[in-house]
């Protein structure tokens, strides 16, 4: 150990220390403040989680810590070294795995490792032992000869991690390594991280948008729009919420129940879960079913343990002010009697033995399901599971290789153009015309959906009002905050009052409040008889669906109501499994069947 | 249907014009290119550096030297005293022509015998060498005619009396600048149309467009028309600049010119749409555009005459819309051609345009449906 650095008897310098760090970016004429005066310290050892939605400043903080960016003002120390003064010294002791790790897809697993070993100057003599350890840790041993491009999403992340670890770092920076990765791989990634921190005493800084992962961290830093909302052990953040979380059931439909409960002044948060509604109260008083007005028959509250998300939502509410839930009545006013009477029940989306191959790769493999009118149907799965391919086929954007599909009684690929006016489609990442203003986007889609005259004006006015877009009328769509982009995309998709709504990962990257608001709208639409088909990789969002299909490697592994799917994972040791438990159980069962076959 | 197409056209124009960068790309580079090409691209030779090795110090040879020195084409940079530096001067590109006047020059002249004058030319650029030879020959012929007239020599048996129609001073700028109208119109139209679909494919908005009740043909029109508009406006700006900045005479009417322009822009938009329907990224679109652009310019007669090309290449140029439009622009500008005399150019371009649009529509449907 060089003299002057970390004398053994003294407390070692913290892994990361930020003093009033500010960093902004210029995007065109607009200045975006990514980090707004962050003061934080992360101690050595264990996992420190950076928790927050997109645009919270997680990646900026990671890149500052890795010495890839300089702060506008303030000071960052990593392992006791001032990053601005000596970035190379920091980089020698830190491993950084960015969100999109630079794997060379045309090189094999082994060649990728070699490349990163060369780049990081690992002596050839040390390599065999190091590789053996990494391959064992990541379970990639059997695949050393495979091209990186042909690995699954989870395996790619593990290879990226192995490449980052080829020179053992003291501090490991992981930027959203689990987003969009299937739960099984996610669990394996966490096992590797546990092994690194417990066994090898590496310090890990881990960023994620999944709030349930916070509970696995030793310390969390809550970020939102460049500000630190709080920090501490996750238990502390959820602990404050203890005694305020309840599970409510009633004979009312769960969507109506949620709507009713959410509008009560003493309810801070209400989300659909396990056939009922999970309620977080504003104060620590047991809710009294009798105090609910108008009365809800058979309403019962059961206390449940607090979750990390409860604490996060509470803090968001404190900082942003409670967003008044906009009444779903306005949505009803928007969707007039344009919908066919609900008498024509039955399946509006029919998928039978649908298969799509790209070359020798089967993206969608013989799937079948049906969606009934007014139902919210979810396709749940990791990136690369075949959800988007299925979606594109249903919307007529991609011809199936084989199989049959019907949307509102038509195959949209061959149906006449006006039939497409009956569906609404919200593409991944809210694809809107970034160069156009909000109002221009609305006007364009209104015309594209063949609205004209008074009705066109009426629908545009409805969209601006319902989605609170009026103050942003002239803002360029590209510059909108993510939450507004999502609203604008939904507004454009609903412009023509579609009877079937396709939503492809509609909540990806949006903060928990934005996601709640979004689902409240979708619930309102479903209540009005709109059929909704939605894809998501957020396990807990599956709870909003009436029925869902779990997809992996192009196949539907399990389909049914959320309760039925969760019930399959119920064991004596796990009486109340989560959707993630169920997902893992379903995948493992499928793997076992595969082995047996 | 027309409302939807109109909405798409408005959207396209807004997307191009709201973005400061693409606005700059449409206005800046074409104007800069026009100015640069207009001045730089010329076949005329001016100020060619030359040296003279005069072995016959006499009145007659000095008169010949004065003819060269006084010509705007040549610029005498050295008078040599021996023949030794000649190779080096040409080798180092200090001069492109060395005139060697023989010691018997005056004697032969007075004796009414052919007086030898040697011209050594840098042959590395064959085109320039030929031009230099021509210019030098002209000067020498003038000198000889003057001499004979003054000294009572026999009148030459035949003299060429050149009179150039349409371009009396044979200024090559008059030939090039109208060609630039065609060149830049093609570049701008091709890029606007060729990149627009690829850009939407990249951002994912193309899917959003395809799930609306718009038909492929609506989308095709909505994507093609903005290119047509922008290309026409761009061409008009260049035409104005050609007339008022470069003083190129516009002898014909605007109608024959704009009829040709419209057909040309339609044909080029069709190619842009074909590129658009085949590619999935803007990079590929750019590559496709240049893959078409370079041969289409070389095989258009923009710089080198089509008549000089091998017959099979000449046949190939028949499918190149720029070939016809160049004839039209130059014809209208310099010759004042009217619609009647250009019919043989209009109809092939109209045919090409129609074929391109049908092919684009077919490719487009195949890619999207």
Image (spheres, coloured by chain):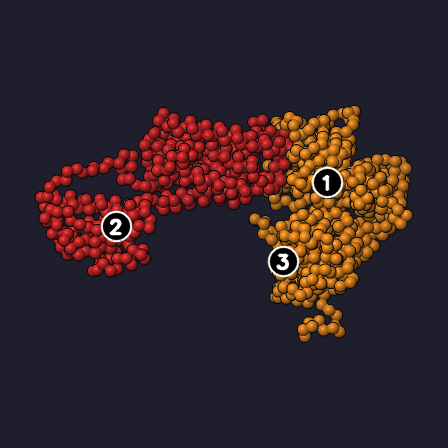
Is B168 positioned to the left or the right of B6 in the image?
left
Asked whether the viewer can see residue A74, the reply is no
Q: Which mark is residue A554?
A: 1
Is B360 positioned to the left or the right of A174 in the image?
left
Mark 3 and mark 2 in contact (Cβ < 8 Å)? Answer: no
Is A490 positioned to the left or the right of B326 in the image?
right
Residue A517 sits above or below residue B102 on the image: above
- Badge count: 3
Nearer to me, A192 or B219: A192
Nearer to me, B297 or A546: B297
What's the CA distance linking mark 2 and mark 3? 62 Å
Q: Are marks 3 and 1 on the same chain?
A: yes
**Chain in red on the image:** B
**Chain in orange on the image:** A
Whole-percent x, y for residue A294 in the image? 85, 36
Instruction: Determine which residue is flagged by label 3.
Output: A115
Task: Tell me which numbered mark, 3 or 1, is placed earlier along the sequence.
Answer: 3
Which residue is pictured at 71% across the width and 35% down the height?
A355
Q: Are marks 1 and 2 on the same chain?
A: no
Nearer to me, A559 or A215: A559
């Amino acid at each position: 150990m060089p003299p002057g650095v970390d004398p053994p008897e003294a407390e070692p310098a913290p892994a990361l220390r930020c003093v009033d760090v500010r960093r902004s970016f210029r995007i065109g004429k607009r200045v975006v403040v990514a980090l707004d005066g962050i003061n934080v310290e992360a101690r050595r050892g264990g996992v420190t989680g950076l928790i927050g939605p997109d645009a919270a400043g997680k990646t900026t903080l990671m890149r500052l810590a890795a010495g890839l960016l300089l702060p506008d003002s303030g000071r960052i120390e990593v392992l006791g070294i001032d990053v601005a003064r000596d970035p190379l010294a920091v980089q020698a002791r830190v491993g950084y795995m960015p969100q999109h790790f630079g794997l060379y897809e045309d090189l094999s697993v082994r060649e990728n490792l070699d490349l990163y070993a060369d780049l990081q100057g690992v002596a050839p003599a040390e390599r065999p032992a190091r590789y053996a350890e990494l391959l064992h840790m990541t379970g990639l041993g059997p695949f050393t000869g495979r091209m990186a491009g042909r690995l699954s999403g989870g395996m790619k992340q593990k290879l990226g991690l192995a490449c980052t670890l080829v020179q053992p770092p003291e501090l490991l920076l992981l930027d959203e390594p689990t987003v969009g990765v299937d739960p099984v791989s996610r669990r394996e990634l966490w096992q590797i991280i546990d092994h690194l921190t417990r066994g090898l005493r590496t310090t890990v800084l881990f960023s994620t948008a999944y709030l349930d992962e916070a509970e696995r961290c030793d310390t969390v830093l809550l970020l939102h729009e460049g500000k630190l909302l709080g920090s501490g052990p996750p238990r502390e953040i959820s602990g404050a919420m203890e005694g305020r979380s309840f599970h409510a059931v009633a004979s009312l439909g769960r969507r109506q129940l949620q709507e009713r409960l959410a509008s009560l002044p003493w309810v801070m948060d209400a989300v659909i879960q396990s056939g009922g509604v999970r309620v977080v109260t504003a104060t620590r008083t047991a809710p009294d079913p009798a105090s609910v007005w108008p009365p809800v028959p058979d309403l019962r509250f059961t206390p449940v343990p607090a979750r990390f998300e409860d604490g996060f939502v509470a803090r968001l509410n404190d900082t942003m002010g409670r967003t008044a839930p906009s009444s779903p009545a306005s949505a009803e006013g928007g969707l007039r009697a344009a919908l066919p009477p609900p008498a024509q029940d039955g399946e509006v989306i029919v998928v039978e033995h649908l298969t799509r191959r790209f070359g020798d790769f089967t993206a969608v493999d013989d799937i079948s399901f049906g969606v009934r009118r007014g139902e919210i149907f979810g396709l749940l799965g990791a990136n690369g599971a075949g959800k988007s391919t299925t979606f594109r086929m249903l919307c007529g954007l991609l011809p199936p290789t084989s199989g049959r599909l019907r949307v509102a009684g038509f195959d949209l690929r061959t149906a006449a153009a006006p039939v497409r006016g009956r569906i609404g489609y919200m593409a991944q990442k809210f694809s809107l015309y970034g160069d156009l203003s909000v109002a221009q986007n609305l006007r364009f889609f209104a015309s594209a959906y063949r609205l004209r005259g008074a009705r066109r004006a009426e629908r545009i006015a409805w969209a601006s009002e319902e989605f609170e877009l009026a103050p942003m009328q002239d803002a360029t769509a590209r510059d909108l905050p993510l939450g507004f982009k999502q609203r604008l995309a939904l507004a454009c998709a609903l412009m023509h009052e579609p009877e079937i709504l396709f939503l492809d990962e509609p909540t990806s990257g949006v903060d928990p409040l934005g996601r709640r608001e979004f689902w409240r709208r979708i619930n309102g639409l479903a209540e009005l008889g709109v059929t909704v088909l939605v894809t998501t990789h957020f396990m807990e969002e599956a709870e909003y669906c009436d029925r869902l299909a779990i997809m992996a490697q192009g196949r539907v592994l399990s389909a049914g109501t959320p309760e039925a799917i969760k019930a399959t994972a119920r064991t004596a040791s796990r009486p109340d499994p989560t959707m993630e438990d169920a997902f893992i159980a379903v995948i493992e069962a499928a793997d076992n069947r595969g082995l047996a076959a | 249907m027309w409302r939807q197409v109109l909405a798409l056209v408005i959207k396209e124009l807004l997307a191009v014009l709201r973005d400061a960068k693409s606005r700059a790309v449409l206005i800046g580079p074409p104007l800069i290119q026009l100015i640069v090409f207009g001045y730089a691209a010329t076949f005329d030779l001016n100020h060619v550096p030359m040296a003279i090795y005069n072995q016959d110090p006499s009145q007659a040879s000095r008169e010949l030297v004065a003819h060269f020195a006084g010509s705007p084409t040549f610029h005498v940079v050295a008078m040599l005293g021996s023949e030794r530096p000649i190779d080096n001067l040409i080798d180092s590109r200090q001069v492109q022509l060395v005139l060697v006047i023989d010691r018997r020059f005056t004697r032969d002249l007075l004796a009414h015998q052919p007086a030898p004058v040697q011209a050594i030319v840098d042959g590395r650029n064959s085109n320039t060498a030929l031009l230099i030879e021509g210019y030098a020959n002209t000067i020498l012929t003038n000198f000889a005619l003057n001499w004979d007239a003054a000294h009572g020599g026999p009148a030459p048996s035949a003299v060429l009396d050149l009179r150039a129609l349409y371009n009396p001073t044979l200024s090559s700028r008059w030939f090039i600048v109208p060609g630039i109208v065609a060149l830049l119109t093609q570049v701008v139209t091709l890029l606007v149309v060729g990149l627009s679909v690829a850009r939407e494919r990249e951002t994912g908005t193309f899917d959003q467009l395809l799930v609306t009740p718009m038909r492929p043909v609506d989308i095709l029109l909505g994507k093609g028309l903005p290119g047509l508009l922008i290309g026409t406006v761009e061409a008009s700006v260049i035409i104005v600049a050609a007339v008022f900045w470069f003083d190129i005479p516009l002898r014909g009417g605007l109608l024959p010119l704009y009829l040709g322009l419209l057909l040309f822009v339609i044909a080029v938009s069709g190619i842009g749409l074909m590129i658009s329907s085949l590619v999935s990224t803007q990079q590929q679109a750019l590559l496709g555009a240049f893959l078409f652009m370079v041969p289409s310019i070389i095989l258009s007669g923009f710089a080198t005459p089509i008549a000089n090309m091998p017959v099979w290449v000449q046949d190939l140029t028949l499918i190149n819309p720029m070939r016809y439009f160049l004839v039209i622009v130059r014809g209208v500008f310099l010759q004042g051609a009217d619609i009647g005399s250009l019919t043989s150019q209009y109809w092939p371009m109209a045919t090409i345009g129609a074929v391109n649009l049908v092919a684009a529509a077919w490719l487009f449907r195949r890619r999207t449906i």
